[in-house]
Image (cartoon, grey):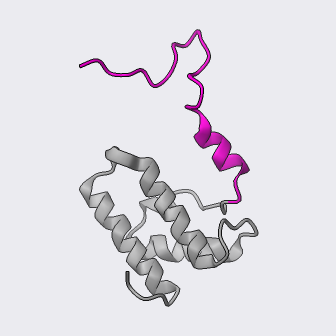
Amino acid sequence: MKRRRTTAPKNRRPIKGRRWVRRVQQTSNAMDLPAGIFTRRPRGIAQGLKRAVARSDRKKARTDFQSAMSMLTYHVNRSGRTLSRADRARFDAAKRELRKAFGRPAA
């Protein structure tokens, strides 16, 4: 089965619509996150997100919890199929810790 090309050859322009991530990261109202935040343990991820959203003037949603959860979900979704089971479990645990940190009920 043929694989579909995701980028154009080096001598041509990129395929239209394939470079949206950089634009989203630069122009969105998403908060600025510290480097390496998603390499921490679940509790560290949750605490780092909570701290980042409290300091940030750029918020994506109405509440701090929504902004923090949105950034975590965005990272998981961007990882896609390349995310290992261990990392998926770590991020799910981070979501639970994030709910605890903001005093939200478990989902």
Find out whether residue 27 is within the magenta segment.
yes
Name the image quarter holding the N terminus: top left
Residue 5: name its quadrant.
Answer: top left
Taking 71 as reference, is 95 above or below it? below
Dividing the picture into quadrants, the one containing residue 59 is bottom right
- 65 shown above or below 85: below
Residue 79 among magenta residues: no
The residue that appears at 57% across and 78% down in the rendered structure is: 65
- Towards the viewer: 68 or 35: 68
Q: Main secondary structure of the magenta part?
A: loop
Q: How many marks?
A: 0
Residue at 59% over, 33% down:
19
Magenta residues, start to end: 1-29
Q: Quadrant of the C terminus?
A: bottom left
Q: Along the line of sight, which residue is nearer the eye, 87 or 105?
A: 105
Q: Residue at x 58, y 31 (%)?
A: 17
